[in-house]
Image (cartoon, helix red, strand yellow):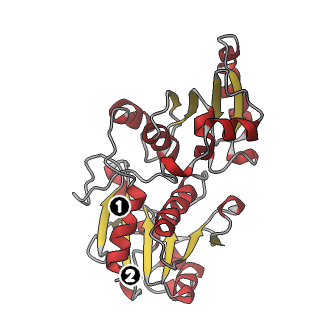
């Protein structure tokens, strides 16, 4: 079975990490799934061995009803011939040809401004229509304007899959008997250095600081090493936040400004959320049922 995950991947690594999380959930089911990712990211080496297809963002004219068949996006999806297409937020790129795709389709939504579902890129007002999708799922607990179907947030690992404290500390050169702090922020180098300096005082409080950023070949997946850390300082994007909550880490979150996403909302409203299970496993079971692979 072929599953294709389509996302943006322009402003950071988070959307790609979500794809890897979904792939891991499918692998845990033990079925033979050919999983691939399509995004505009130019560097997605950390996804290996997942196959990534880089498709630069195309303009509205390339993707409109008269021209979409010549677009790189349409040609790539149809060439892959997926049995299932998973769309992470980026509905408007597909709006004029989603009905042309004969595969099953899932749309994933997380906390975004309601205006995200009615946008005017340049010439035409586009509105999200859930009808072409077999399932529309909210993947964090918010009042989603396009669906009332919610699954637990999606996380890349389950607790039994990550390293023990001794193993993680050994690989990172940290002392398991001392207090260790992870400072992880996937932003450009200058912004990373500025934020890291603000928390350098933690050294005076007895923490050994370990720094990681996917913009500078940081650890991936960082959750594999969570048992090494007594404190996590990270961004409040979808993955960083929900990984810390799922693994019950003592954490300081640094919300970053985003166009459609309010990361502060996530910190203020969701810190006390209690998982019933990993949403990656929930989604994988939904996919298995849709593709009749149980």
The image position of residue 202, as x and y in percent, is: 65, 16
Mark 1 falls on what kind of element?
helix
Task: Give the mark nearest the N terminus, 1 or 2.
Answer: 1
**Mark drawn on residue 265:** none
| Location of mark 2 (residue) | 293
- Image position of 10 with respect to 237: above or below: below
Is there any visible trace of residue 224 in the rendered image? yes
Name the residue: 33% across, 70% down. 286
| Location of mark 1 (residue) | 282
The image position of residue 100, as x and y in percent, is: 39, 88
Q: Are marks 1 and 2 in contact (CB under 8 Å)?
A: no
Can you name the residue that lies furthest to the left here? 148
Left or right? Give the position of 73 relative to 293: right
How many C-alpha atoms fall within 10 Å of the one at disc 2: few (<14), some, or many (≥20)? few
Name the residue: 71% across, 31% down. 210
Q: Quadrant of the C terminus?
A: bottom left
Front residue of this view, candidates 139 and 206: 206
């Amino acid at each position: 079975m072929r599953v294709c995950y389509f996302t943006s991947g322009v402003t950071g690594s988070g959307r790609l990490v979500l794809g890897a999380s979904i792939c891991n959930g499918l692998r845990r089911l033990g079925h033979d799934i050919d999983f691939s990712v399509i995004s505009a990211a130019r560097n997605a080496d950390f996804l290996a061995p997942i196959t990534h297809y880089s498709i630069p963002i195309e303009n509205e004219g390339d993707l409109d009803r008269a021209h979409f068949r010549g677009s790189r996006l349409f040609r790539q999806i149809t060439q892959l011939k997926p049995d299932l297409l998973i769309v992470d937020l980026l509905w408007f790129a597909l709006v004029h040809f989603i009905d042309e795709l004969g595969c099953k389709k899932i749309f994933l939504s997380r906390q975004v401004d309601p205006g995200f579902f009615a946008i005017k890129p340049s010439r035409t007002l586009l509105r999200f229509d859930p009808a072409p999708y077999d399932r529309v799922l909210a993947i964090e607990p918010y009042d989603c304007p396009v669906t009332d179907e919610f699954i637990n947030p999606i996380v890349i690992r389950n607790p039994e899959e990550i390293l023990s404290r001794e193993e993680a500390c050994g690989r990172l050169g940290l002392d398991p008997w001392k207090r260790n702090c992870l400072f992880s922020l996937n932003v450009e180098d200058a912004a990373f250095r500025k934020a890291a300096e603000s928390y350098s005082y933690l050294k005076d409080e007895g923490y050994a600081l370990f720094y990681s950023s996917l913009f500078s070949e940081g650890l991936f997946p960082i959750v594999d090493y969570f048992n090494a850390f007594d404190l996590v300082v990270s961004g409040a994007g979808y993955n960083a936040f929900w990984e810390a909550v799922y693994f019950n880490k003592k954490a300081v979150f640094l919300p970053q400004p985003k166009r459609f996403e309010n990361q502060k909302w996530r910190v203020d409203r969701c810190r006390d959320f209690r998982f019933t299970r990993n949403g990656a496993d929930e989604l994988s079971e939904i996919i298995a049922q849709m593709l009749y692979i149980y």
